[in-house]
Image (spheres, rainbow, N blue to C red):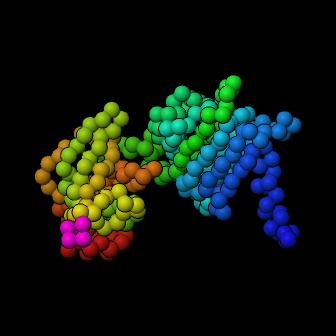
Amino acid sequence: MLTPMLASLLLPLLFLCRISFCQYSSDQCSWKGSGLTHESHARDVEQVYLRCSQGSLEWLYPTGAIIVNLRPNTVSPAAARLSVCIKPSADSGGTNIYLDRNGKLRLLLREQDHAQGKVQCFSIQEGALFIEAVPHLDISRRITEFQYELVSDRLGPDAQSLEEPCHPCSDTEVLLAVCTNDFVGRGSIRRVEQEEEHSTVTVEISRLYRQKIHVFASGGVRVRRWTGSIKMPPQCGVRAGEGEFLFTGTVRFGEAWMGCAPRYKDFLRLYNEAEQQGTNPCHVETD
């Protein structure tokens, strides 16, 4: 039997699911709905709230529209400086996706562009996602599906992709990156492949300090080497060559993106100076 407190928590979710079949994880990171259960007397637009740093949305056979509010699960002044990135699946379609800020819509992604799987980013202050179904005679094969992530404000308020601007990192940025980034490794550049929208840098890691997920594959138990690929903007002009670097960066939608990458000898000098001054934000084994 439901207690009064539990019932009060469930009622808002039940209201949101009047139109669609909805599935919520316990932390409301993901949403799944279906337009096949649409009720003619119900509202055409539903509010969906997702309060995680990453998750997914899947809208089967979309009809009408939904508004998706993406917010962090903590209240902080820094939350206003976050950006939101979404990545549609290759099979996604059936809707146009807009940014809705106080009732003013700006087109973010057309239906025919979903299948490209291109990441779209925008400032969290630009509003919610207004996802509107495109009328079709046959909706049985229409599914809107994407992953989302909340990312730091380094992307900038006008960022449209995951690419970070190419500029040398300051000493403070390097030290913070070593302590906070999703991956940190010492190694060398083996190959650079130039593509239309980004460069793919193949690296060999001799010492792996941290990786959020396994973006770098181990060479085996007896071989203390890792290899992997890191993406970065094409205009950065990186080249394969001699020398060791300290690679840092973030993992977005399962892919590694380059952050600060000083030469290892420069990082070592910087780190030792900060160690002597007592200003290092964290400890790193440099031997």
Residue farthest along the left direction in this orientation: 242
Q: Residue at x 40, y 61 (%)?
A: 213
Report the magenta residues as a range. 220-224
Residue 285: % across, % down = 26, 74
Query: Can you see residue 270?
Result: no
Residue 169 in the magenta stretch? The answer is no
| SS assignment for the magenta stretch, majority | loop
Q: Residue at x 12, y 52 (%)?
A: 242
For the C terminus, the quadrant is bottom left
Q: Residue at x 73, y 48 (%)?
A: 21
Query: Can you see residue 78?
Result: yes
Q: Quadrant of residue 171?
A: bottom left
Relative placement, left or right, of 258 versus 69 is left
Q: Relative to 161, is 242 above or below? A: below
Residue 227: % across, % down = 25, 57
Q: Quadrant of residue 100?
A: top right
For the N terminus, the quadrant is bottom right
Residue 221 in the magenta stretch? The answer is yes
Residue 85: % across, % down = 51, 45
* Depth check, front residue: 172 or 146: 146
Residue 46: % across, % down = 75, 42
Relative placement, left or right, of 270 versus 7 is left
* Depth check, front residue: 48 or 82: 48
Q: Quadrant of residue 24?
A: bottom right
Q: Relative to 149, is 279 above or below? A: below
Relative placement, left or right, of 15 versus 59 is right
